[in-house]
Amino acid sequence: MRIFLTGASGFLGMRALKYFRAEGHQVIGLARGVAARAAIESTGAQFLQGDPARVEDYAAKLAECDAVVHAAAPVEFWGPWDYFEKSIVGASRDLLMAADQAGVKRFVYISSESVLQDKAPLLDIDENAPYPTQPNSVYGRAKKAAEEAIRAAQVKTERIILRPTFIWGPGVKALDTMIEKVKSGEFMWVDRGATLMEMVHVDNVAHAMHLALSRGRDGEIYYVTDDSPRSAREFLSALFAARGVAAPEKNLPGGLARAAAAIVEGVWKLFRIKRAPPLSRFELAFVNQPRSYRIDKIKSEFGYRPITSFERGLSGLKADA
């Protein structure tokens, strides 16, 4: 199969690229900067420089491909809506339409659990759960709008939407950010880190992406997890330890943390401050919004099973330290 992969130089994209190549597929890897060229070409894939939001610049290449895997997106959670609308919603919609015009058979979209994140706990959730009125991050809001646009499009191209939970593994930048906060004394648990959360190793997402190239039903959404929910403290402490960092003991009650996040966000919005706030509802939800997802659907229709266990994933983090 010949695959067009956006975000090929990113944390998830590069892992998927290597997985696709190992499975014998030809890949055109789209990346913004030329600095990614060597890494992409070292896998035997074809490098293509381009902005995912400027589909017209590379649309001709889509006709050479059997499938498009759209993994590119700014992993940011604060900023003006216009930026997110263009880079996530518009880019995803335009890419799907261009793929359909080019006769591409299948379009795999990498979404996020953030489309459902607001205030309420998300426990034992499956793909039938309704969207909240508005997710608690502009990123989640944009991902939600992109999902809706993709599912509503009148196209012949088959559309598969994957919703990974928090993606972890060697090279994940979010862990570096958390460790910096631990070292500076800024990191603290909320409600002692007892909240249940879900995660998914980058290898398992890449595996699901590969299965989605030929399995699943048009227009359907599929959750992807490690199928092993853990408390925030158990999960993050293990990640910190794998990098040789001791977990902190500082703790903040959930009610106080939520009030503080609401106040900080309000101030940032009132004064139209462009940089991200030091505390947001989305960041708080990461460690304090209970969530667990059912993955019966992807198991049944894809034959998906996690290929990297929690223990093996931790070993990979230690090797990467």
Image (cartoon, rainbow, N blue to C red):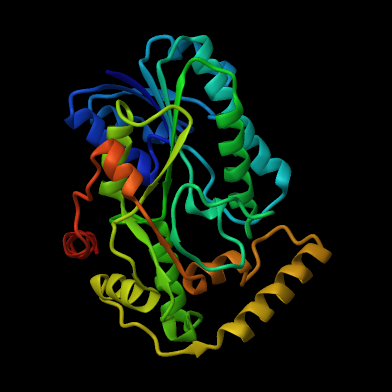
Q: In the image, 281: left or right of 102?
A: right
> Is residue 107 visible to us here?
yes
- Residue at the extreme right: 270
Asked if residue 315 is positioned above or below residue 59 in the image, the reply reads below
Quadrant in which the C terminus appears = bottom left
Q: Is 90 in front, or is 123?
A: 123
Please state the horizontal and vertical placement of residue 156, each as a whole percent of the image.
Answer: 49, 15
Asked if residue 13 is positioned above or below residue 251 in the image, the reply reads above
Q: In the image, 94: left or right of 18?
A: right
> Is residue 15 visible to us here?
no
Please state the horizontal and vertical placement of residue 177, each as a whole percent of the image.
Answer: 45, 66
Quadrant in which the N terminus appears = top left
Asked if residue 294 is positioned above or below residue 297 in the image, the reply reads below
Q: In the image, 9: left or right of 136?
A: left
Please state the horizontal and vertical placement of residue 290, each as a whole percent of the image.
Answer: 47, 70
Q: Looking at the image, which residue is at 33% across and 55% down?
A: 200
